[in-house]
Image: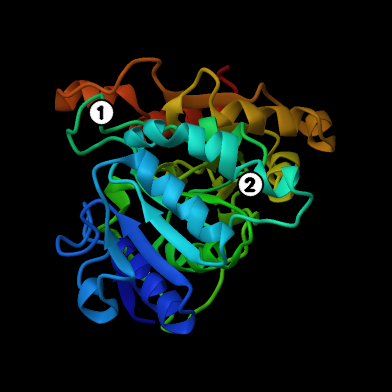
Amino acid sequence: MRELTYAEALREGLRQAMRADARVFVMGEDVGIYGGAFGVTNGMLEEFGAERIIDTPISEAVIAGACIGAALTGMRPVGEIQFMDFVTLSMEQLVLQAAKIRYMFGGKASVPMVLRMPGGSGTGAAAQHSESLENWFVNVPGLKVVMPSTPYDAKGLLLAAIDDPNPVIFIEHKLLYKTKGPVPEEAYRVPLSQSVVVRPGAHVTVVATSIMVPRALEAATTLAGEGIELEVVDPRTLAPLDAGPIIASARKTGKVLVVHEAPERGGFGGEVVACIAASEAFDFLEAPIRRLAGLDVPIPYNRNLERAAVPQVEDIVREARRLARGEY
């Protein structure tokens, strides 16, 4: 199968959605002539024109609010926030409006919109351009939260998100844009809320999100040389969470490590731990469930400090090895 980068897969998904449905359009800061902050919409203005690839003012509140209004009138908007950090400026629109409209109108109105945003650290963009805020949205009933980790999932989940009648927060890690992987040419869908085991193993379950999935897979390759087999599970959709594969894996291995980039305090990992602890897998656990997450600090600009602030491959190797050996 041909390979595309993560960014190319997203672009192809957007193109296919827009060719198939005239209601789909894109809006955001510099998505037109510039092609998006990370190049995802590069070349799309030439194909679809300025009425469907819309450059907005520098206002995240405008982007979110306009997407909500368009969705309410029957359109299928895809908004882009240049950096996830700036979504803070659109929280009223997303939390008080988009997330609640379908419920408050008894299903007579819906908000079928997607809001894409690059999150995470690793580019030296410092504290105001490197955050992982996914758990803010997981905590809001009415919003769906998606974090693809591969080009295949990026395209399939984006197409599924555009089809969905609910508002979807679509989080793309900056370091994944240039990664490559197999992507079919057809317009396929990856169902929302479907966790997947990306690597089977027998000794330790690693539940990882976004950039932590390839890091967990690299750690698994390292530990395999020591006779330790990690089973890596990718939730892909954080809300609603498909906990079944996670619980089944925890029951199988008896040892669980949850890894994410966002700070540990109040992070998504705590929700995963609670799901396992409240399930039948609890009786099969051979060790306390461990979390490996970002430090409770703003992301530093200094490259060495930035790297130390979030889990790296060697951190996953260390913690998984300790669990496997009973060093807890």
Find residue 100 and report its image quarter.
top right
Comes first in the chain, label 2 or label 1: 2
* x then y, percent, for residue 235: 58, 48
Q: Which residue is mark 1?
A: 307
Q: Residue at x 42, y 36 (%)?
A: 90
Q: Residue at x 21, y 52 (%)?
A: 37
Q: Residues within 10 Å of mark 1 (few under 14, many from 20)?
A: some
* x then y, percent, for residue 28: 30, 53
Q: How is the image coloured?
A: rainbow
User: Which disc number belongs to residue 59?
Assistant: none
282 sits left or right of 127 in the view: right
Q: Residue at x 49, y 79 (%)?
A: 21
Kindly state the secondary structure of the residue where label 2 is placed.
Answer: loop
Numbered disc total: 2
* x then y, percent, for residue 189: 56, 72
Residue mark closest to the camera, 2 vs 1? 1
25 sits left or right of 275 in the view: left
Q: Residue at x 73, y 42 (%)?
A: 104
Q: Which residue is mark 2?
A: 202
**The disc labelled 2 sits on which kind of residue?**
Ala
